[in-house]
Amino acid sequence: MNATSQLPYPFTQQPEEPGSPDEPPGRGGTDTGVITKTQPKTKKPSLYKVLLLNDDYTPMEFVIHVLERVFHMGSEDATRVMLHVHQNGVGVCGIFTYEVAETKVTQVMDLAGQHQHPLQCTMEKE
Ligand code: TYC
């Protein structure tokens, strides 16, 4: 007695084993070799420019202080960026990932608000 004979009608055949080859093994097969290389699933994060905007009221010294404190600039770089913004209306303070850029904008806006200066800071996708 085999396994099939114990099954109730109409189950007279064993189901085919999953993955059973449709072709005989060895020569004569039409399979082609596919080499798959696993890609590392890391993606570069989007980057955002943090922009400082000029206004007529915020003191130059305060802007320099903000650039030193929030963006870790030395006094020469901070002065250069402040003057660029003063003369051009807008300037880049740095380029960061989204959350870092957002934090910097908040820090600048909070400092400006605490000192009642109208200094504005925004971010835009690179
Ligand atoms: N324009 C301002 C002044 O003359 C200085 C200033 C520079 C303000 C840069 C804002 O982002 C700024 N006092």
Image: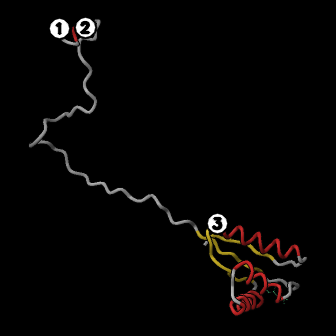
Q: Amino acid at mark 2?
A: Gln
Residue 7 to residue 121: above or below: above
Which of the two labelled residues, at mark 1 and mark 3, occupies the earlier sequence position?
A: 1
Q: Are marks 3 and 2 in contact (CB under 8 Å)?
A: no
Helix, strand or loop for disc 1: loop
Q: Nearer the viewer, residue 62 or 51?
A: 62
Q: Position of residue 56 (x, y in %)?
A: 86, 86
Q: Which residue is mark 3?
A: 98
Label 2, residues with CA under 10 Å away: few <14, some 14-19, many ≥20: few
Say which quarter of the image contains residue 104. bottom right
Q: Amino acid at mark 1?
A: Met
Which of the two labelled residues, at mark 1 and mark 2, occupies the earlier sequence position?
A: 1
Check the picture and name the quadrant holding the N terminus: top left
Ligand 1 - quadrant of the structure image: bottom right
Q: Amino acid at mark 3?
A: Tyr
Disc marking residue 1? 1
| Residue under the image location 18 percent in, 11 percent down | 2
